Image (cartoon, rainbow, N blue to C red):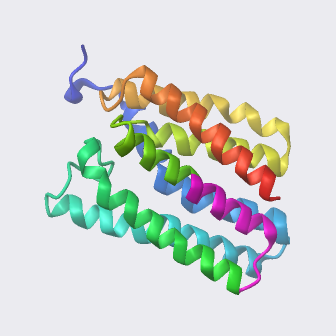
């Protein structure tokens, strides 16, 4: 078995470049652009979701990792995920309130609520079923389906990137194959279905 020091560079690149915080920062901007076709509105609504769903939680996660509260900025140990996941939920909840009060485009509310409810399912699986589902795979697959619903089925060609990040989590030894498969299916089905229904 490959040790962490011998892990392929491609696995480390995928895990960092396609990390949940990166995707959650970029996805709202793409959805906002489609919904508004306006640069100022794209930045406004995209950053409301991106900052509350990604930036604020990552600040908490990185500071916690540096303080030794969990095992790194990807929080690979299941037990250490309580505070990070609850932080994302609370912060994103503030973002959803801001979208609602600011009369944001319906697509942005649909996106934020799809992200929030997907997170609730991740919490239920992680702590209810006591199983470490892959959040990397869930976010990547959910983002892909939401972009396909927004821009068209050609976006599904990006499934190769979902497969890449899923493979990377197994190659790094952070997840098993079933954990990334369940994460990907869960992200695609929950996130995609909720987004479509709320639109």
Residue 76, above or below 73: above
The residue drawn where x is 42% and y is 30% is 168
User: Which residue is situated farthest in the top direction here?
Assistant: 1
Q: Which residues are magenta?
A: 102-117
- 98 or 148, which is in the foreground? 98
Q: Quadrant of residue 156?
A: top right
**Residue 8 painted magenta:** no
Residue shown at 64%/43% (left/top)? 190
- Observer-nearest of 20 and 133: 133
- Residue located 56% across and 67% down the image: 50
Dominant secondary structure of the residues highlighted in magenta in the image: helix
Q: Nearer the viewer, residue 10 or 53?
A: 53
Which residue is at a point 47% across and 72% down the rendered structure image? 91
Query: Residue 105: x and y, percent?
Result: 80, 73
- The quadrant of the rendering that contains the N terminus is top left
The answer to whether 169 appears left or right of 192 in the picture is left
Within the image, what quadrant is residue 192 found in?
top right
Specify whether 56 is left or right of 36: left
- In the rendered image, residue 38, in percent from the top left (x then y), is placed at 82, 76
């Amino acid at each position: 078995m490959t040790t962490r020091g011998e892990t392929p560079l491609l696995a480390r690149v995928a895990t960092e470049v396609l990390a949940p915080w990166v995707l959650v920062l970029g996805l709202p901007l793409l959805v906002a652009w489609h919904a508004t076709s306006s640069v100022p509105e794209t930045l406004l609504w995209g950053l409301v979701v991106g900052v509350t769903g990604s930036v604020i939680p990552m600040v908490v996660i990185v500071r916690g990792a540096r303080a030794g509260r969990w095992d790194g900025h990807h929080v690979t140990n299941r037990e250490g995920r309580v505070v990070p996941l609850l932080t994302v939920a609370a912060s994103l909840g503030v973002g959803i309130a801001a979208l609602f009060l600011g009369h944001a485009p319906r697509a942005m509310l649909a996106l934020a609520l799809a992200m929030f409810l997907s997170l609730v399912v991740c919490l239920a699986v992680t702590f209810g079923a006591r199983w470490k589902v892959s959040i990397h795979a869930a976010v990547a697959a959910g983002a892909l389906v939401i972009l396909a619903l927004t821009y068209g089925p050609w976006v599904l060609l990006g499934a190769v990137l979902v497969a890449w990040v899923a493979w990377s989590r197994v190659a790094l030894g952070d997840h098993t194959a079933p954990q990334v498969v369940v994460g990907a299916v869960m992200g695609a089905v929950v996130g995609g279905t909720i987004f479509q229904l709320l639109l």
